[in-house]
Image (cartoon, grey):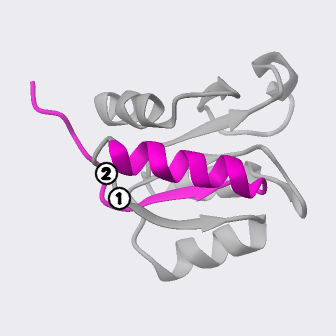
Amino acid sequence: MMTVLFKNVLIVEDEMLIAMDAEDSLESAGHGVASIARTVRDAMSILQNAKVDAALLDFNLPDGTSAPIAQWLQDHGVPFAIVTSQSPNQLCDEGLPRSRIYQKPSDYAAIAQDLAAAA
């Protein structure tokens, strides 16, 4: 089975050290990182203006939750996962489209591979 590598992963994470760790992990595994967004507004702007073929989303961001980003990704057929410090049960009533949810700390390269295998 051939390993699928994403060329343009969007990382949405407001904690810069975590975002940098995610970027390093993805790139070490052979994935490309399109951009890092720290807010919902920045992520939505990137999605409107750049090609993204997968996304890893923190849930709580300075200007809201990543639910609208997740909805956009689902509507456009882009695989994504939520990577959060909250328990998955806490997110049940947050209006998220059906999504994979991982708890921090996480192996971002492994999450991307899970997304690739499911795509």
Q: Is residue 46 above or below residue 19?
A: below
Which residue occupies 68% across, 46% down? 18
Mark 2 touching mark 1, by CB under 8 A?
A: yes
Q: Name the residue under label 2.
A: 6
Q: Name the residue under label 1.
A: 32
Which residue occupies 40% across, 34% down? 115
- Image coords of residue 103 (percent x, y): 70, 24
Quadrant of the image for the C terminus? top left
Quadrant of the image for the N terminus? top left
Left/right of residue 40 with respect to residue 108 in the rendered view: right
Amino acid beneath label 1: Gly
Which residue occupies 42% across, 37% down? 112
- Image coords of residue 79 (percent x, y): 44, 44
- Image coords of residue 84 (percent x, y): 74, 34
Amino acid beneath label 2: Phe
Label 1 Cα crowd, 10 Å radius (few <14 / some 14-19 / many 20+): some
- Image coords of residue 21 (percent x, y): 58, 46
Please tell me whether mark 1 sits on a helix, a strand or a loop: loop
Disc tally is 2
Pick whichever, 68 or 83, lies toward us.
83
Please tell me whether mark 2 sits on a helix, a strand or a loop: loop
Label 2 Cα crowd, 10 Å radius (few <14 / some 14-19 / many 20+): many
Does 11 appear in magenta?
A: yes
Q: Measure the C-alpha gap from mark 2 to mark 1.
A: 6 Å
Which range of residues does the magenta coloring cover?
Answer: 1-28
Q: In this view, does 4 lie above or below 77?
A: above
Residue 103, disc = none
Q: Which of marks 2 and 1 is in front?
A: 1
